[in-house]
Amino acid sequence: MWIVIRRQWPILSVYAGLVVGLGIVTVNDFRRGAVVLALSVLWAGALRWILSDAQAGMLRVRRRRVDLVVLSVLGSVLLVLALVVPNQ
């Protein structure tokens, strides 16, 4: 089991960020939680860019270029929306 965890650390670190972001949103701090979610997606894109295909593990879904474009656009749009939404 530890071998699987060691090989899949990139996706597990992204999942950890997503869980933390959702936890922050649940505690009624939408903006900070959404920013953490966006940073987690951007972190996934950065890991996909830095790591080789073998090291990326489950982050590797498509070709590297497609993964980078999808993750960076999604993370950037989510970050902009999180910062633009007015406070309640």
Image (cartoon, rainbow, N blue to C red):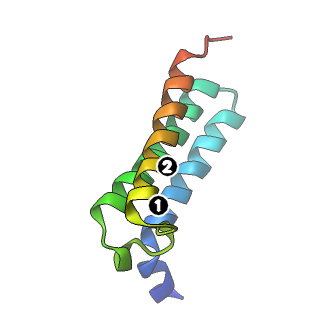
Give residue 13's mark.
1
Q: Secondary structure at mark 1?
A: helix
At x 56%, y 24%, the residue is 81
- The vertical placement of 9 against 67, above or below, is below
Nearer the observer: mark 2 or 1; the answer is 2
- The vertical placement of 54 against 80, above or below, is below
Give residue 70's mark.
2
Q: Amino acid at mark 2?
A: Val
* 50 relative to 37 in the view: left or right: left
* 69 relative to 37 in the view: left or right: left
Residue 70: percent from left, percent from top: 49, 49
- The vertical placement of 74 against 55, above or below, is above
* 12 relative to 26 in the view: left or right: left
Residue 72: percent from left, percent from top: 43, 44
> Which image quarter: residue 9?
bottom left
Residue 77: percent from left, percent from top: 51, 32
- The vertical placement of 67 against 74, above or below, is below
Q: Earlier in the sequence, mark 2 or mark 1?
A: 1
43 or 62, which lies in front?
A: 62
- Measured in 3D between alpha carbons, the distance from the residue under mark 2 to the one under mark 1, in whole angstroms, is 19 Å
At x 54%, y 56%, the residue is 16
At x 42%, y 80%, the residue is 6
At x 62%, y 11%, the residue is 87
Quadrant in which the N terminus appears = bottom right
**Badge 2, how many Cα within 10 Å: few under 14, some, many 20+?**
some
Q: Amino acid at mark 1?
A: Ser
Q: Secondary structure at mark 2?
A: helix
73 or 14, which lies in front?
A: 73
Residue 19: percent from left, percent from top: 61, 51
Quadrant in which the C terminus appears = top right
**Badge 1, how many Cα within 10 Å: few under 14, some, many 20+?**
some
